[in-house]
Image (cartoon, rainbow, N blue to C red):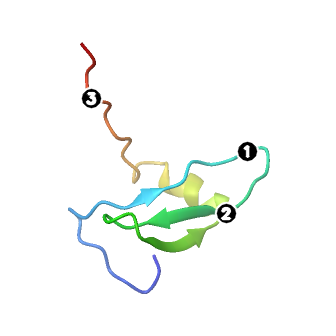
Amino acid sequence: MCKKMYDLSETIYIQELDPIHEETQKVFGEDKEYLTDISSDVFLSLCKGFIVELEEAPTS
């Protein structure tokens, strides 16, 4: 993505898909800095095994 190679341990954040407006998804780096946009098709492809959902912290 972009013109940068990402380390396997580096975290990037991708905006959730908006099925109503079908806009592009914004991609952010570990420091929450905006990197680029990706198409909905690319996002859906990444969801097939590449994107790992964040685990919610248990609430007491």
Identify the element where label 2 is drawn: loop
Residue type for callout 2 = Thr
CB-based contact (under 8 Å), mark 2 and mark 3:
no
Q: Secondary structure at mark 1?
A: loop
Q: Residue at x 53, y 74 (%)?
A: 36
**Residues at badges 1 and 2 in contact (C-beta under 8 Å)?**
no
Q: Are marks 3 and 1 in contact (CB under 8 Å)?
A: no
Disc 3 crowd, CA 10 A, few/some/many (<14, 14-19, 20+): few
17 relative position to 32: left or right:
right
Judging depth in this view, the residue of 13 and 9 nearest the camera is 13
The Cα atoms of the two marked residues, 3 and 1, are separated by 27 Å
**Looking at the image, is mark 3 or mark 1 earlier in the sequence?**
1
Residue lying at the far bottom of the rendered structure: 3
Callout 1: few (<14), some (14-19), or many (20+) C-alpha neighbours within 10 Å?
few
Mark 2, residue position? 24
Q: Which residue is mark 1?
A: 19
When asked about the image quadrant of residue 19, the answer is: top right
